[in-house]
Amino acid sequence: MSKRRRDWPEAPEPLPAAVIDNHTHLESIAGVLADGVPDPGVAGHLERAAGVGVRAIVQIGCDLDSAGVSVEMARAHPQVVAGVAIHPNEAVLHAGIHEVAPDGMAPAPLARHDVGLDDAIAEIARLAADSRVRVIGETGLDHFRAGPRGRAAQREAFRAHIALAKELDLPMQIHDRDAHADVLEVLEADGAPLRTVFHCFSGDAQMARHCADRGYYLSFAGTLTFGNAEGLREAARVVPQELLLVETDAPYLTAHPWRGRPNAPYLLPLTVRALARVRDVDPATLCEALTATSEELYGPW
């Protein structure tokens, strides 16, 4: 079995009109690069992205360390707005739960997890008051990485983030891994924020229609281009244009033909062009619509 390369893929052809990366983690990219492969830094990533038509990003910080970094990044760079949250898998560790989940991996708490879950969410609420924070996220449920006790903690944190998004009148981005029914149940029970986004949407066409009927936004990542993702492509065909978004979720989920290589916002055109093919629309028209929807959600950069 060949070892995955951890150097940079070549840049794709520039897009015919500008788009926005609705979900990325710039602070994590250096950690997936091979020794000797340079990370260009925030300014370098933004410049490389702009060169192919990705003019702005939503930088997501979903643990106590990266949330603060993301706010500082957004303050320093006008092309960046921030999202902050306690990721569902982080919530389990802040709750002091150390059970082995379906992923089979033993928990590995860090120093930041000494902070209790309530206090961690309170810190997110403090950071979210900054004007450069435009979304609460990513929050939600991850059944793959949580056992029964962990799932209860994730649900508690998810509900707290829903309440925070509504209190601050901010959009909310959802992480949903192997938990479609439970995520939808919580949204129905608590009442979803007015602007709710399923980041890296992973459901089928039936779920996409269910979400669209409720006005939820669906954001598609490089997974749309994977060979085994026909169900996801069918979902992308049925989403109303005004609820459609795109993202990289860098540094992972790199689009075909670079699956498994490091990801960054400059590779978003691969997903945009795939989405245009799936929906049989002109790429320039799609780009303009995607940008308009992003600005409607998050406001001006």
Image (tube, helix red, strand yellow):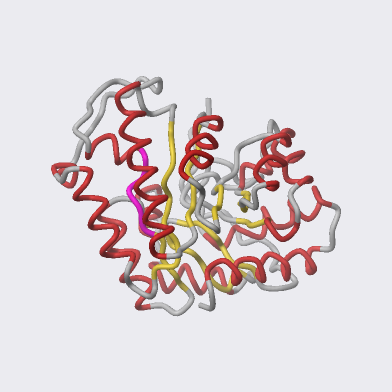
| Direction from residue 289 to residue 219 in the image, left or right | left
Vertical comparison of 285 with 157: above or below: below
**What residue appears at the point 41 percent right and 46 percent down from the top-left corner?**
139
Q: Nearer the viewer, residue 129 or 42?
A: 129
Does the magenta stretch mainly form a helix, a strand or a loop? loop
Q: Position of residue 93 (x, y in %)?
A: 24, 36
Which stretch did the figure color magenta?
Answer: 84-88
Vertical comparison of 122 with 222: above or below: below
| Direction from residue 288 to residue 158 in the image, left or right | left
**What residue appears at the point 31 percent right and 71 percent down from the top-left corner?**
72
Q: Nearer the viewer, residue 242 or 245?
A: 242
Q: Position of residue 54 (x, y in %)?
A: 60, 69
**What residue appears at the point 67 percent right and 71 percent down from the top-left corner?**
292
Vertical comparison of 246 with 74: above or below: above
Q: Position of residue 30 (x, y in %)?
A: 36, 55
| Direction from residue 236 to residue 156 in the image, left or right | left
